[in-house]
Image (cartoon, rainbow, N blue to C red):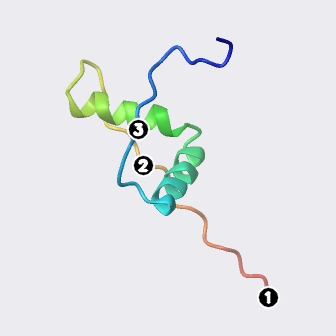
Amino acid sequence: MPNKHGEKLRGLRGVSDQLWTDFGNAVARADSDRSAEIRRFMEWYVRRVDAEHPRRPAPPEPPGDTT
């Protein structure tokens, strides 16, 4: 099948739309994506060899003063 991924889809429950959006924005600032960061955290959490705790990105820039 042309649109079938080679990997299983894993679901997360209990994540609000706002948290999912904020997380997406944060990983974009870190030039990454949600899957990579979740995987990085899981590898660190289970103590995989050479796994490092993910780094948090800089906070978003506050909206500029438009006056």
Identify the mark nearer the N-term, 3 or 2: 3
- Residue 34 locus on image (x, y percent): 50, 40
In the image, residue 29 sits, relative to residue 35, either above or below, namely below
- Extreme-left residue of the structure: 47
- Extreme-front residue of the structure: 1
- Residue 24 locus on image (x, y percent): 55, 49
Q: Mark 1 to mark 3: distance in Å?
A: 44 Å
Which mark is nearer the camera, 1 or 3?
3
Amino acid under disc 2 = Arg
Identify the mark nearer the N-term, 1 or 3: 3
Horizontal arrangement in the rendering, residue 49 relative to residue 33 (left or right): left
Q: Quadrant of the N terminus?
A: top right
Q: Mark 2 to mark 1: distance in Å?
A: 32 Å
Amino acid under disc 1 = Thr
Q: Quadrant of the C terminus?
A: bottom right
Classify 10 Å Cα crowding around label 1: few (below 14), some (14-19), many (20 and above): few
The residue lying toward the viewer, choosing from 45 and 3, is 3
Name the residue located 50 percent from the left edge and 59 percent from the top edge: 17
The residue lying toward the viewer, choosing from 10 and 58, is 10
Identify the mark nearer the N-term, 2 or 1: 2
| Secondary structure state at the residue bearing disc 1 | loop
Q: Are marks 2 and 1 in contact (CB under 8 Å)?
A: no
- Residue 37 locus on image (x, y percent): 44, 37
In the image, residue 18 sits, relative to residue 27, either above or below, namely below
In the image, residue 36 sits, relative to residue 24, either above or below, namely above
Q: Can you identify the residue that label 2 sits on? A: 56
The residue lying toward the viewer, choosing from 48 and 62, is 48
In the image, residue 67 sits, relative to residue 30, either above or below, namely below
Classify 10 Å Cα crowding around label 2: few (below 14), some (14-19), many (20 and above): few
Q: Can you identify the residue that label 1 sits on? A: 67
Q: Which mark is residue 11?
A: 3
Q: Mark 3 to mark 2: distance in Å?
A: 23 Å
